[in-house]
Amino acid sequence: MADKKLSAEKRLKLIRKISALADGITLEYVTGLSETINDPEKDAKEKRKAFAEMDKVLRISKQYSDRELLAEGKTTANIGIDGKGTLPFKVIFTETVEAPAEPEADDRL
């Protein structure tokens, strides 16, 4: 049991170290993209490209942040509308299958 705990602690330290390095690189990259977006001498095409790239980088950063929280044993979830993680209703999906239609009687007989 102690070996598993030690292994988990080492893994968590490694994840934190990687996360810190990734955060530094991401910060530099996003700063450069921000400068491109805010530079009045850049054309609209370059700004759109930088903005799209920034959106992608920020989404990836969010995913890694969630993974780090999960590695630490914390759960991540969509907290919902009321901030409590629950909604005032439950959703149940049901499937109704119609019976095959019976052929209509032929009145000509």
Image (cartoon, rainbow, N blue to C red):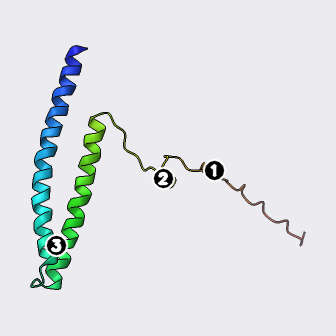
Q: Quadrant of the C terminus?
A: bottom right
For label 3, the residue is 50
Nearer the camera: disc 1 or disc 2 = 2
Give x and y (percent) for residue 15: 17, 38
Residue at (29% x, 46% y) in the render = 66
Report which quarter residue 68 is drawn in. top left
Left or right: 103 in relation to 5: right
Left or right: 79 in relation to 19: right
Amino acid residing under circle 2: Gly
Left or right: 101 in relation to 16: right
For label 2, the residue is 80
Q: Quadrant of the N terminus?
A: top left
Amino acid residing under circle 1: Thr
Q: State yes or no: discs 3 and 1 in contact (Cβ < 8 Å).
A: no
Q: Residue furthest top?
A: 1
Sequence order check, earlier mark of 3 and 2: 3
For mark 1, give the secondary structure: loop
Number of the label disc, if any, that sits on residue 94: 1
